[in-house]
Image: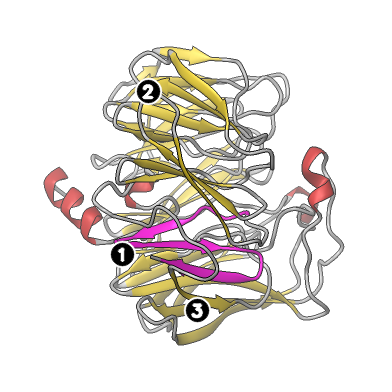
């Protein structure tokens, strides 16, 4: 597919996957609100069943939301588990559902059951059984349902196909969060949440497997990034590898070995002719690699101090905005990794990834406060807005609307 056509399709598709257009977290032509409150700018809010950290996606005037509903009491989030590994005790029968919502009104257009099962493994006490954000190209919708299955639907919610993710040992399936990524006629799923990991691509229309590559890269919960040319980059605590998204052939790799081979969560960020890799935990690092290479490559630059653990950075107008879990924002130049400034933005923890639009960067903390920071080399807080509910999900942007998912509701703000 020609690059120009791909870019036009991406711009026209709204916020159709995790972190929106091309996984960038940027919607520069959009004009989301600067400030809001419970009494103004709330277009609508909708109570959602179950528990999920999957972000909403938007395409063609519709918002899609994924959730997992326990059949034996409500699932809850344990915020005390932020600094340690604690597993919840709700590995009981669940129903995974997808809702299609009219973007203008908040009206539910359809509500479909995608899968029913007892999860194969326990979830982290701060996680959910629906961590992964769905993806759509307008005609098809794809969702990865924890350690269970990946499913394909049409626009009307009809289930077209379903693939078992094939977990060989339930104890190795640690509540996945990698979101599916659509490229041309394929959907790519990264399954590094298990010891016998892999990346696989399936045909959107039929679910037929197009290719599959085995991986032994250690645990990763990251979503892959794909360039318009089809260079697929996958984060991990061992080797960062790039593949041909059409065939699965490895193109290049970078040594990212660390002593503690876990906890690679942030998404690779495409920034012009570079990809920026990050991930805390152990002795993680933050570095840039030139795209388009072959074989074993070296980073162009790297940073090893205070790397974000959960949130993915966002590159916007030549600067990389990285919010740490402790609420400290660090801004770097994409060209050389030099630090522009650092500033505490929030006193609460941050799990959601920042997004950018209209010359602003939007940062949502777990308290439900959204901090709007002016994009640029000098820190300026433009607004602080609160919905007063726990927020773990990355927001979505559609035109003049900002979509926030709290632990209980979906909010449309404009």
Extent of the magenta region: 392-413
- Dot 1 alpha-carbon crowd within 10 angstroms: few under 14, some 14 to 19, many 20 or more: many
Q: Can see residue 298?
A: no
Tell which of 11 and 43 is nearer to you.
43
The residue that disc 1 covers is 137
From what the image shows, is residue 62 above or below residue 242?
below
The residue that disc 2 covers is 377
Q: CA distance from mark 3 to mark 1?
A: 16 Å
- Dot 3 alpha-carbon crowd within 10 angstroms: few under 14, some 14 to 19, many 20 or more: many
Q: Position of residue 127 (x, y in %)?
A: 71, 55
Q: For this view, does 12 lie left or right of residue 98?
A: left
Label 3, secondary structure: give it. Answer: strand
User: At 68% from the left edge and 46% from the top edge, which residue is drawn?
Assistant: 194
Q: For this view, does 90 lie left or right of residue 141?
A: right
Is residue 223 a member of the stretch shown in magenta?
A: no
Label 1, secondary structure: give it. Answer: loop
Question: Mark 3, mark 1: which one is toward the viewer?
Answer: 3
**Which callout, 1 or 2, points at the residue further toward the start of the chain?**
1
Where, quadrant-wise, is the C terminus in this rendering? bottom left
User: At 21% from the left edge and 60% from the top edge, which residue is drawn?
Assistant: 12
Kindly identify which numbered label has been placed on residue 300.
none
């Amino acid at each position: 597919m020609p690059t120009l056509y791909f870019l036009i399709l991406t711009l026209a598709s709204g916020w159709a996957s995790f972190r929106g257009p091309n996984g960038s977290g940027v919607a520069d032509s959009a004009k989301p609100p600067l400030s809001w409150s419970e009494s103004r700018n709330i277009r609508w809010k909708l109570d959602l069943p179950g528990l999920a950290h999957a972000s909403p996606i938007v395409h063609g005037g519709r918002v899609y939301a994924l959730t997992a509903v326990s059949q034996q009491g409500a699932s809850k989030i344990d915020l005390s588990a932020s600094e340690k590994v604690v597993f919840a005790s709700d590995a009981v029968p669940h129903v995974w559902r997808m809702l299609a919502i009219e973007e203008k009104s908040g009206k539910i257009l359809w509500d479909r059951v995608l899968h029913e099962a007892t999860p194969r493994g326990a979830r982290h006490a701060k996680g959910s059984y629906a961590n992964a954000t769905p993806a759509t190209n307008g005609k098809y919708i794809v969702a990865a349902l924890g350690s269970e299955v990946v499913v394909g639907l049409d626009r009307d919610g009809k289930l077209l196909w379903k693939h078992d993710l094939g977990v060989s040992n339930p104890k190795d399936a640690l509540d996945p969060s990698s979101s599916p990524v659509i490229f041309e006629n394929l959907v790519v799923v990264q399954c590094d949440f298990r010891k016998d990991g892999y990346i696989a691509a399936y045909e959107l229309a039929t679910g037929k497997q197009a290719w599959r590559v085995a991986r032994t890269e250690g645990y990763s919960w990251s979503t892959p990034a794909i360039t318009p040319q089809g260079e697929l980059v996958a984060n991990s605590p061992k080797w960062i590898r790039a593949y041909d998204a059409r065939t699965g052939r490895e193109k290049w790799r970078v040594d990212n070995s660390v002593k503690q081979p876990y906890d690679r969560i942030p998404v690779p960020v495409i920034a012009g002719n570079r990809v920026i890799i990050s991930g805390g935990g152990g002795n993680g690092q933050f570095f840039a690699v030139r795209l388009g290479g072959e074989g074993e490559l070296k980073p162009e630059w790297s940073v090893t101090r205070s790397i974000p653990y959960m949130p993915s950075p966002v590159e916007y107008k030549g600067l990389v905005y990285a919010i740490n879990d402790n609420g400290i924002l660090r801004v770097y130049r994409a060209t050389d990794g030099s630090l522009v400034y650092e500033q505490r933005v929030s006193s609460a923890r941050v799990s959601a990834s920042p997004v950018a639009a209209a010359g602003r960067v939007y940062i949502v903390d777990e308290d439900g406060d959204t901090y709007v920071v002016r994009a640029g080399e000098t820190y300026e807080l433009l607004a602080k807005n609160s919905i007063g509910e726990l927020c773990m999900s990355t927001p979505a942007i559609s035109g003049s609307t900002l979509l926030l998912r709290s632990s209980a509701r979906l909010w449309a703000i404009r």
